Amino acid sequence: MIQRIQTFFLLIVGLISGVLPFFLNLWVEVGGKEVFAQDEVMVSLVFYVVTVLAVVSILMYKKRQNQFVVNRLNMILNLFLLGFFVYRSLSLSGETVVSEKGIGMLIPVFSIVFLVLANRAIKKDEDLVKSVDRLR
């Protein structure tokens, strides 16, 4: 059913990863230039893929196992994105001035949290369906 709580969580993931990276800066370079997701092609592409996977997962509400797998794939993609952000923030060598990290670097963390919540709700629904099938 599309009116379940996991749909709400997946909608939040879609909005967080589809809209926020283009308004919140990811980091600030030494010259004071703010870097957004549209400035980095691969980062914006990964954010688009995360959004598309969240929408696809919403539309797969009849196939809960496949929805669960798509959410896991989305979590792995967010972990790679988070790893890139950590690598990017830690490998700024040769600087005398420390660059600022933006709030946009936390977007994958929030996405992962909401994906975990969605997977818990999907698992709860699957367990409920299995328990009802045992009664028949």
Image: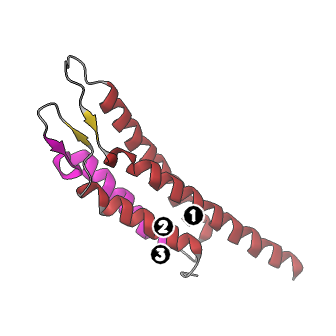
Residue 130 vs 82, above or below: the answer is below
Q: Which residue is labeled 2 in the image?
A: 10
Q: Which label lies toward us, 1 or 3?
A: 1
Residue 42 location in percent, x, y? 25, 46
Residue 100 vs 17, above or below: the answer is above
Residue 77 location in percent, x, y? 42, 48
Please state which amino acid type lies under the numbered disc 3. Answer: Leu
Which color scheme did the rendering employ for the protein? secondary structure
Which residue does the image show at 40% across and 41% down from the upper left? Answer: 82
Dot 2 lies on which element? helix
106 relative to 136 in the view: left or right: left
Please state which amino acid type lies under the numbered disc 1. Answer: Ala
**Looking at the image, is mark 2 or mark 1 earlier in the sequence?**
2
Q: Which residue is labeled 1 in the image?
A: 118
Q: Which residue is labeled 3 in the image?
A: 59
- The disc placed on residue 79 is none
Please state which amino acid type lies under the numbered disc 2. Answer: Leu
Instruction: Give me the C-alpha separation between circle 2 and circle 1.
Output: 7 Å
Q: Quadrant of the C terminus?
A: bottom right
**Residue numbers of the magenta segment:** 33-58
Which residue does the image show at 81% across and 78% down from the upper left? Answer: 132
**Looking at the image, is mark 1 or mark 3 earlier in the sequence?**
3
Residue 85 vs 19, above or below: the answer is above
Dot 2 and dot 1 residues touching (CB under 8 Å): yes
Instruction: Give me the C-alpha separation between circle 2 and circle 3.
Output: 10 Å
To which quarter of the image does residue 67 belong? bottom right
Residue 4 location in percent, x, y? 58, 77
Dot 3 lies on which element? helix
101 falls in the magenta region: no
